[in-house]
Image (cartoon, rainbow, N blue to C red):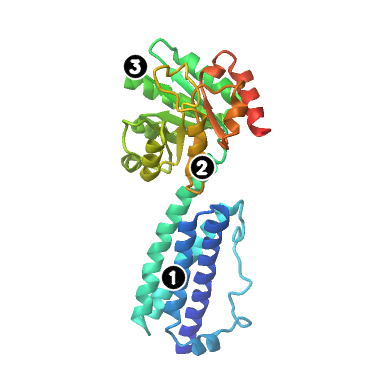
Amino acid sequence: MNNRLYRIIDANFNRSREALRGMEEYCRFLLDDKALSGQAKQMRHRLCEAVGRLDAARLLTARNTDGDVGRGLSVEGQLSRANLADCFTASAKRASEGLRVLAEMTQTINGDVATVCEQLRFEVYGLEKAVFTATFKQDRLERIRLYVLVNVEPDTTDAAALELARRCIAGGADALQLRAKGVSDRRFMTLAGDFVQICKTGGAVSIINDRTDIAVLSDADGVHLGQDELHPKLARTLQKKPMLTGGSTHSLDELHTAMEDGFDYVGVGPAFASPSKPNLKTAGLDYVRQAVKELKGSGIVPVAIGGIGPENLKQVLETGVKAVAVASAVIAEPEKMCRQIKEMLTNE
């Protein structure tokens, strides 16, 4: 019986260790996330250290791969993986299952090892959640090159705002932000629901300006928060699923604060005088260039904003920024102008 116990422990140690390595590689090479990769690596080493307290000779002696009746058994879809995220999920499930078995079985011979395995099992659950969130954000942030601001004033019709969104998406816009100023909450909510659906249908990232509550209720991909809006950490407590959280910055001081606050992306500008915000002091291309440098390696994506159009886009791209936000530049001919700007972005 004891030999069979060690055989179970050996099999589940290998299963858990290999699964943790798979999780680590996903965090390291796909997410390029040093913290999450380091967490997975540390968990794997703690598991090896814990099982190392057991009799290694007995574990190896009990191993019988040739005589394992489970070898070669499979169920339909067992190895079906559509993408690398599926591979990570499979590894996470395998790790938690193996750790649960280890916690149960090692309890009969070494309670300290069982305690470590139980702790690691719950840490796997937490890591799986953190990686799911990081994957969601990376997937959306990597799409964004052309970000369009859809401004709605009290005299703007909902139909006009939604048609603008459709035409911008048709022209290649990757993300759209709905800004509704001076309108009722009820109207904003209804408009946001339609706006988000249009973005989903067109494959664009949907962002709601200022209002975390409306972003959550409309199932938007994210919320953009101004300097005087809700702190991003508080905004995230209201979110029912992973969401992008963006902020606005106009100086290095504001940028450093945004980095500490943990935004996923930040608007940097105004690069030029902005017709939509004439009273806002121009930060200039030097600030955009500095912001790109400061944010390198932080995981926070800079989006240049303010007075940007085809006539000055080349100058903006020379700062090193990869994503730009536009508004007035595309109003007259949304589809045509978006297509022109997107071509410039993708061919730079």
Q: Distance between the residues labelled 3 and 2?
A: 37 Å
Point 39% across, 18% down: residue: 279
User: Which percent across, then down, holds residue 63?
Assistant: 56, 84
- Dot 2 alpha-carbon crowd within 10 angstroms: few under 14, some 14 to 19, many 20 or more: some
Q: In which quarter of the image is the C terminus?
A: top right
Q: Is residue 97 visible?
A: no
Secondary structure under the numbered disc 1 in the rendered image: helix
- List the residue tagged with mark 3: 182
- List the residue tagged with mark 1: 99
Q: What residue type is labelled 1?
A: Leu
Q: What residue type is labelled 3?
A: Gly
Secondary structure under the numbered disc 2 in the rendered image: helix
Asked if 135 appears above or below 88 in the picture, the reply is above
105 to the left or right of 81: left
Secondary structure under the numbered disc 3 in the rendered image: loop
Q: Is residue 75 visible?
A: yes
- Dot 1 alpha-carbon crowd within 10 angstroms: few under 14, some 14 to 19, many 20 or more: many
Point 50% across, 89% down: residue: 58
Asked if 181 appears above or below 296 in the picture, the reply is above
Front tag of 3 and 2: 2
